Amino acid sequence: MTTHDNWFIEHFQPTGSAIGFRLTAKLDEVQSPFQKIEIYDSTDWGKLMVIDGAMMLTAKDNFFYHEMISHPVLFTHPAPKRVVIIGGGDCGTLREVLKHPGVASVTQCDIDEQVTRMAEKHFPELCRSNGDPRAELLFDDGVAYMANCPAGSVDVVIVDSTDPVGPGEGLFNKAFYESCCRALKEDGILVQQSESPLMQLELINDMRAEMGKAGFDSFKTLPFPQPCYPTGWWSVTLARKGGRGFDFRQADSSTKAFDTLYYTAALHTGVLATPPFVASALRD
Amino acid sequence: MTTHDNWFIEHFQPTGSAIGFRLTAKLDEVQSPFQKIEIYDSTDWGKLMVIDGAMMLTAKDNFFYHEMISHPVLFTHPAPKRVVIIGGGDCGTLREVLKHPGVASVTQCDIDEQVTRMAEKHFPELCRSNGDPRAELLFDDGVAYMANCPAGSVDVVIVDSTDPVGPGEGLFNKAFYESCCRALKEDGILVQQSESPLMQLELINDMRAEMGKAGFDSFKTLPFPQPCYPTGWWSVTLARKGGRGFDFRQADSSTKAFDTLYYTAALHTGVLATPPFVASALRD
């Protein structure tokens, strides 16, 4: 990371590419027990949250990620009531999940309370559902939380984590996926952020292989724009068991009673058609 | 642009954001009468072409742009035979257009011959259809070319230009669009690269307004990933006259006899569903 001339630049080694934003000020910084969290303001993207030098979110463009990690999986599950979010400390995913009236309870388990405190202070729009009576916010180890979850108790697990290094590393292997598989009901679905579908297809294949060893047997990777992440094109990967596919509740999605900026039923239909080069690399 | 520590970084002022690539070597440079063209090699993106400090294309990701500026418009037109490409000197768009067997002739008119010479040398894969007997390569002023085009002689005009500054500036105003409108047959279609659909929606509105003054009355902006351009999310805008919409030849697209890496009929259907925040900003 360099901030010379008021530009934040993140050099992302795994993709050999960089992204950056023109800053106006540094607003805040805290060193938690886990990571360094910085808040900047920018000329065109609103406030930025940076963790250990990696761009986490901007006020301007976080809706792509938060909508795409929430609505496709929730409209794929036949009737999601019990949702667990691992990570997700900025609370944007929680806000989107709680837009679904059928969801009865959501536990968000992020290891780092300071991420949520910084979000409450600098991104209050992401935290506006934190007081919803259906929401439980825990600050604990997500790996342990899933390991201790009662078997067959969860409809949807959303892994809204940082990259597979540092605090997020334990969320990308067979042991963690086994806990998720056990905690999910028979028709439950796991969804996880899965990096760049242009440059990190081998990582997605590795994730799927670990998920497969843990008992999942169907996988779907959905790409979407995410300008503040390296390559500007990001993905989530859904995993199910029992040979169930990824058809979604199109009628419910088309008539949803809440607003979104990016996600629509038509977009969901379109994104299920995996681009040929991605399908080929993922052996879909 | 800075290249310290072997990273090319483009600071894009209109969006307040930057993109960059890790370099291995500078391979070539030429100062043409119009602009400076540089060729770099990179660790993960193959060769890069940079014009006046702005990233034009990488070997790795140019297929998004070249497919999306070609196939949607060609599958929207009922039977495109005569195609004009304004700009497009790297020849990647020409290659995609010539994949359509019904296309009888394509004229590519780029003001800068050196772009094509550099593409032939460093991106031969983009130039492999340059010898097609249906292709004509002109190195001339695209504004003048369109102004002199016989009225009602063209099915599709593709404006594959640089940003609306420098040599590309004259390709974003009413006078140029009037020439295009006049040159197009009644059911003809204009398509033009239209910058970032996240950060430059006002520019797209301005383009559409100028196109409207020139006689076009229907517009459609199609977003797509383009990692090497600022924000990683780019667009083309289609314009028609006579109240025709943008339904496409879905059956022909589904059974096309050529390969693509990104474009499919299903993707085309999906991308016609404009994301809500884009539709709202563009008053679609």
Image (cartoon, coloured by chain):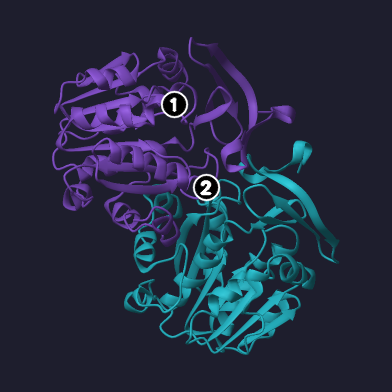
Chain colours: A purple, B cyan
Which is in the foreground here, disc 1 or disc 2?
Answer: 1
* C-alpha separation, residue under disc 1 versus residue under disc 2: 19 Å
Farthest residue in the front direction? Answer: A213
Query: Whole-percent x and y of residue A133?
Result: 20, 18
Label 2, residues with CA under 10 Å away: few <14, some 14-19, many ≥20 = many
The residue located at (34%, 13%) in the rendering is A140
Q: Is residue B6 left or right of residue A154?
A: right
Q: Is residue A116 visible?
A: yes
Query: Residue B173, percent across and down?
Result: 64, 66
Report the residue at 27% width, 42% height from top. A239
Which of pointers 1 and 2 lies earlier in the amino acid sequence?
1
Instruction: Identify which amino acid the numbered label 1 is placed on.
Output: Glu
Local crowd size for mark 1, using a 10 Å CA cut-off: few (<14), some (14–19), many (≥20): few
Tag 2 secondary structure: loop
Tell me if I can see residue A259 in this picture: no
Residue B120, above or below A193: below
Q: Is residue B149 left or right of residue A116?
A: right
Name the residue nearer the viewer: A265 or B120: B120
Quarter holding residue A151:
top left
> Which residue in the protein does label 2 denote?
A199
Residue lying at 35% horizontally and 42% vertically, measured from the top left: A209
Q: Could you say which is closer to the camera, residue B135 or residue A201? A: A201
Who is closer to the viewer here, A276 or B89? A276
Mark 1 element type: helix
| Rendered position, B23 above or below B56 | above
Residue that numbered label 1 is attached to:
A169
Specify the quadrant of the image occupied by residue A184: top left
- Tag 2: amino acid: Met
Q: Are marks 1 and 2 on the same chain?
A: yes
Q: Position of residue A183 (x, y in %)?
A: 19, 27
